[in-house]
Each structure stands twice: as C-alpha cells, then as structure tokens.
Image (cartoon, grey):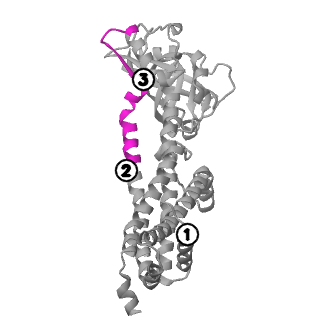
C-alpha cells in the first residue's frame, strides 16, 4: 500500500502530539514500550531455550555417543566391530556402565561408573579437553577419574584413595559381601554439566568387568559418528551387522525422547505466552488510535472537504499505527539481540553484585546460560510483531475514514 508525501506528512504531524497529549501520550508510549519489551523478551527466551537444547544435546552425546547397542536381558559377548566397514563411524566404545557406592576415608556417595577402553578416553572431547591430571594414561592400573564437583564434595584430590562397591557379591567366611576394589584418583574433569560433574566416574573396562563379574563382556556398545545427520543410514547398516532380534539398536534421540519432547513443548508454550505481551501492546495501539481519531475529528472533516479521499484518511492512520509497531519491533529486536549475546555476563554481574544465584547448575544441569540466536526465528518474531501491529490499526483507521463530515462541520 503506497503512501504519498502528503499522507506521510500528516502521519508524522499527528505523531508529534503523542509526546505531550496526556492520556493519548501515555497509551502510545505503553504501546511502543510493550511491543519493544515483547519482541526483546521473545528473542531472549527463545534463544536461551535453543541454546539449552543444543548444549544438553552436545553434552549428552559427548558422554554417551550417537547409537547404542544392547542385548535384551544380558551382556554382550560379541562386541568387536570393524570400524573400517562403516565410513561414518568415528569410534566404537564397548563399555560397562553401572551404579556403585564410593567410599573415601570419611565420606561415601552413590556414583555412576563408566568403564571404558583406556585408549578411547582421548576421543571423549568433553572429558579429555577438560581433564586435570598429571598422568599420560589416567586410566592405567587401578586409576579412576572423577567429576570435579564430586571430588570437591567428598574432599578428594588427585592421589586420594577411594573404594568402589558393586552390586555383585562374593562369598566370604563372614557371608555374602559386595565386590569392591580400591582405586587411586588420577584426574578430575569439568564438563560444565552438573549431572556429570557431581555423579560421574571413569575406570578402565578391565576393572569394570572385574567389579561386575562380566569377564570378556560389555553391557552396551556405544557408537560415535562423524556425521550425526547420517545416523539413520548407519543404524540400518548396524541392524544388518546385528540381525538377531535379541539385539536392540537405538539412537540418542530415542533414548532421550521424553526429555527433548518436554523441552519442545515447553518452548512452544513459552512462545505462546510471551506473544501475549505483543498482543496486549497491539490493543494499546488500537486504543491510542481511537483516541487520536476522536481528537482529530474536525481536522479529518476538513481534510475530507479539501479533497482527501476516505482511502487517504485510512492510509494516514494505518501509517501512524504501523510506525509505532515497526519502531517498537526494531528497538525490541536490537535490545533482545544485545542482551542475548551478553546474557552470561549480565548473570555473573547480578550474582556477584547482589549475592544472587541465578540459573543454579544443580537445577538446570549446566553451569552457564547457553544461548543460540537463530536468524530464522528472529525473522518470524519480527514478522509476527509487525503483522499484529498493522492488523491492530485497520479497524480504527477504517473508522476514521468513515466519519460523516456534514455533521462534524455543522457542529464546529
């Protein structure tokens, strides 16, 4: 819808009094600020939820792999896979994962133990790149690696001795006792995910097999891929490699489907709820335009008398409402983008200055606020905000264009 010079002139002329005309000014500012806040809030919250999903996804895969092979009801004997037959496999990690009781000199804690082939440790980037150790081979002998928060909680350091107890038992003169083994802490890691840093330990596969009485067996085969986008193709090839129905092959999406579905629903609900801020601001646009039409009734009648068409009047008020909506959207987008890219710094500043605990890691699994700004999503938010703002102007603009000038000028 083109706007000529005279219509643009009138629109900007009518916008000027909005800065000083009492109630009209207040409502107009509320409209502008409401749209800006709504857009900024949508961008910030959606970016945080995008980042939260991607961060959890990367860290879950960083610990567990993309594909999992289990054998129903028992351990796996045949766990040797020729990686050269699968172009997309980065590495294969047959392992035993089990729960255990860890006892130090004066404290104990339940832990999740993952026993892996020591040569695979360097392939776990999330652990290996954040590993604090003074050993070239941290899983050699009776060594164990702990999450740093777990070590801190139990007062343990590198070189400390601990004992792990498994659910398997051995017969002794004193009866049946759980199998146990003493380990020396060779290193600690910090993944940034509290669930792992507080509960996770690593030992060698051989030690894990001894503790669980699973000699020459593993409980799961984890497959780490070079290209996760080709996960379905690799899964199909593995199905041919393990054709028996007793083998269960699942990908990380299936294993964590409930968790990520919950995140998806939460993200959708948050978008709908926060969109209401923009809708409320749009109602303020409607109110301010009706008040403006009421205040400018005589001027509208004069404009109609000197030849401005009904469509011209309608375009003038459409332009006024659109300027409020578009300017609020632009300011909101800028504000949302700037806050999003500095969100972690803002959180740290507030925590330090006011002694707060915003985004506690024990509640949200990770120790920093993750953000991921998606340009497509921002475009959708901008289109939504501008569309709502323009739609809100249509009815009051139409009302202004339908005013009967005869009665107005007669009573003037």
Q: Mark 1 = which residue?
A: 8
Residue 274 shows in this picture: yes
- Mark 2, secondary structure of its residue: helix
Q: Mark 3 = which residue?
A: 166
List x then y, in percent, for residue 245: 30, 12
Counting other residues with Cα less than 10 Å from the Cα at mark 2, is it few (<14), some (14-19), or many (20 or more)?
A: few
Counting other residues with Cα less than 10 Å from the Cα at mark 3, is it few (<14), some (14-19), or many (20 or more)?
A: many
Marks 1/2: CA distance?
A: 39 Å
- Mark 1, secondary structure of its residue: helix
Marks 1/3: CA distance?
A: 79 Å
Q: Which residues are magenta?
A: 240-268
In the picture as drawn, the residue positioned furthest to the bottom comes out as 411
Which circle, 3 or 2, is nearer the viewer? Answer: 2
Nearer to me, 141 or 386: 386
Residue 173 shows in this picture: no
Q: Quadrant of residue 394?
A: bottom left
List x then y, in percent, for residue 206: 51, 13
Work out whether 365 lies above or below 98: below
Which labelled disc corresponds to residue 148?
none
Q: Earlier in the sequence, mark 1 or mark 3?
A: 1
Evaluate if marks 1 and 2 touch, with contact meaning CB atoms under 8 Å apart. Answer: no
Q: Quadrant of residue 90?
A: top right
Evaluate if marks 1 and 3 touch, with contact meaning CB atoms under 8 Å apart. Answer: no
Nearer to me, 318 or 72: 318
Judged left or right of residue 396, residue 364 is right
Which circle, 1 or 2, is nearer the viewer? Answer: 1
Name which residue lies at 37% across and 33% down.
Answer: 257
Q: Mark 2 = which residue?
A: 269
């Amino acid at each position: 819808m083109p706007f000529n010079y005279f219509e643009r002139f009138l629109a900007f002329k009518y916008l000027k009094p909005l800065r000083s005309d009492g109630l009209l000014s207040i409502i107009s500012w509320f409209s502008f600020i409401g749209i800006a806040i709504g857009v900024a809030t949508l961008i910030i919250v959606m970016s945080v939820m995008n980042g939260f999903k991607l961060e959890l996804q990367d860290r879950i895969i960083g610990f567990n792999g993309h594909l999992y092979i289990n054998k129903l009801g028992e351990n796996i004997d045949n766990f040797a896979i020729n990686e050269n037959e699968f172009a997309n496999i980065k590495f294969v990690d047959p392992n035993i994962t089990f729960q255990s009781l860890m006892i130090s000199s004066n404290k104990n804690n339940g832990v999740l133990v993952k026993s892996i082939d020591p040569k695979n440790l360097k392939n776990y980037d999330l652990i290996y790149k954040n590993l604090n150790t003074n050993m070239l081979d941290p899983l050699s002998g009776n060594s164990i690696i702990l999450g740093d928060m777990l070590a801190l909680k139990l007062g343990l350091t590198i070189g400390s001795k601990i004992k792990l107890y498994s659910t398997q038992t051995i017969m002794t003169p004193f009866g049946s006792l759980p199998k146990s083994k003493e380990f020396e802490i060779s290193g600690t890691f910090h993944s940034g995910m509290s669930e792992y840093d507080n509960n996770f330990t690593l030992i060698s596969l051989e030690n894990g097999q001894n503790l669980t009485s699973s000699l020459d067996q593993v409980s799961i085969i984890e497959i780490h891929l070079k290209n996760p986008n080709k996960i379905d193709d690799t899964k199909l090839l593995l199905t041919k490699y393990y054709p028996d129905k007793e083998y269960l092959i699942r990908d990380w999406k299936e294993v964590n489907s409930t968790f990520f579905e919950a995140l998806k629903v939460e993200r959708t609900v948050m978008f709908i709820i926060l969109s209401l801020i923009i809708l409320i601001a749009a109602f303020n646009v409607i109110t301010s335009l009706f008040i403006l039409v009421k205040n400018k009734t005589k001027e509208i009648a004069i404009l109609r008398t000197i030849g401005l068409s009904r469509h011209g009047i309608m375009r003038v008020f459409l332009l006024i409402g659109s300027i409020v909506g578009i300017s609020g959207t632009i300011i909101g987008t800028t504000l949302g983008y700037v806050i999003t890219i500095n969100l972690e710094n803002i959180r740290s500043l507030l925590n330090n200055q006011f002694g707060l605990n915003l985004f506690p890691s024990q509640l949200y699994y990770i120790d920093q606020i993750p953000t991921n700004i998606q340009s497509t999503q921002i475009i959708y938010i901008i289109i939504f905000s501008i569309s709502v703002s323009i739609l809100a102007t249509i009815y009051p603009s139409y009302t202004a264009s339908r005013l009967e000038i005869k009665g107005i000028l007669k009573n003037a």
